Image (cartoon, rainbow, N blue to C red):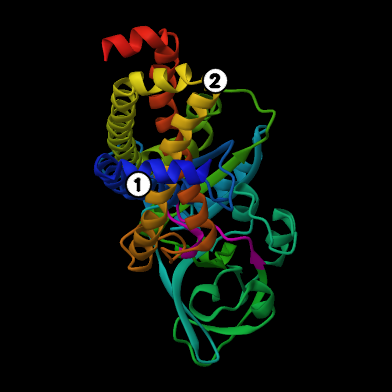
Amino acid sequence: MNKKLLKQIWNERRINVWLWVELLLVSVVLWYVVDTSYATLSTYFEPRGFDISNTYLIRIDALTAKSPDYVDPSTRTTKPGEDLLQIVDRLRHLPDVEAVSVSLNSYPYNGSNSGFMARLDTMRVWDVRREVTPDFLRVFRYEGANGESPDQLAALLKENNFIAGENLLTRDFGLKGKDILGRSFYLNDDTIKTWPLVAVTRPVRYGDFRSIYESRYIIILFDQTKIAGCNEVKVRRCEVCLRTHDNSAPGFIDRLRAMSNSQFRVGNLFLSDIQSMQKVRTMYQMDDMNELRNQAWAIGFLLLNIFLGLLGTFWFRTQQRRSEIALHISCGSTHRKAFIRLMGEGLLLLVLATIIALIIDFNLAYAEYTNSMNGITLAPVRFLVTTFITFVLMSLMIVIGIWFPAKQAMKIQPAEALRDE
């Protein structure tokens, strides 16, 4: 059968060569679209390494001297940092609250960063520093690479040690978390004091559109003494994050706002803003989500045009061959055999075009003209999956383009079709 189809395709090469070129070009364009979508969605659905369900971000601010409720600092015996700790303690005792943390430039979907250098022997990496209280690991439910729970990780974080993602040295030096656990590092160009790495967590991503490959960090302790010593300016920079119990009633933000003036005003400090982390996530990624939607609309429009183009080509081609179909049937061929022959011819042309398209696709990925995913543009699994999806999509378009006109053509009596021809 294949030999006959090849012979027929060759005999009709003047017509088929243009169809083959069309299939080749469409295959390359469609593969690029599929590959771009695959890279974007694969990155988006990678494990985040944290959990923001039932979590909230609270901003602390201070009254100015113009406020009628302003308290002269000289009349108080506590510092702003100590007032902050008192607010955190009151939040911790609320029935709905599971854990409360204080941090600097650390919560997920945070546009502010603190850069930090970590050095092990001659290996240096720059990454994000997260200065947090131990409860931060409980609030966002970080998990250890070796199965440690958030509570166990929180218990390990002490003064003069640190925690890092297991991919800290993977990208640049190929070392995994188990290779560096327990080793002592120099942090931030300090050549005297060393910091032991007491735990490694599963990779924690910077955001939904940033891959694990791009996201590296270290966690150091933001202890009570440091917080207590914060002045008013630094207190404003502090992030208070909390997690409520899973069975808490809805409306926690409204309840907290209702009691904020009476229970959470300490000195000149007050709760200036309360947001769910889901809202923080939405606001942080608004531009990325808009770009993703625009990209989806563009890809959808392109796919529609490709679909209609291929559908129309094979529909018109099948319609033109009604007399040929009738002749085969009048010579003893069954409807099923005639149908399989048409389908086989279209799919065989696609296979011949796909062979060359694969070479072009491979070179596009090898030359890094496609989107990077985890630092590379050409990966075996990714290439196989995207080429398979492309082939399946084009096969469906061809099958639909042949199926309906062929079914209609076979309902016509052979003599009538030949007479019309």
Residue 203 included in the magenta stretch of the image: yes
Q: Nearer the viewer, residue 137 or 26?
A: 26
Q: Is residue 154 above or below residue 207?
A: below
Which residue occupies 43% across, 52% down?
39
* Horizontal and vertical percent position of residue 357: 36, 54
- Quarter of the image for residue 144 reads bottom right
Which residue occupies 35% across, 7% down?
416
Residue 391 included in the magenta stretch of the image: no
The amino acid on which the numbered mark 1 sits, given as a three-letter code, is: Trp
The label shown at residue 334 is: 2
* Horizontal and vertical percent position of residue 56: 52, 39
- Quarter of the image for residue 322 reads top left
The label shown at residue 10 is: 1
Q: Nearer the viewer, residue 253 or 184?
A: 184
- What segment carries the magenta color? 200-213
Q: Is residue 125 above or below residue 367?
A: below
Q: CA distance from mark 2 to mark 1?
A: 24 Å
The label shown at residue 201 is: none
Side of 102 relative to 269 (left or right):
right
Q: Does dot 2 land on a helix, a strand or a loop?
A: loop
Residue 164 seen from this side = yes
Q: Quadrant of the C terminus?
A: top left
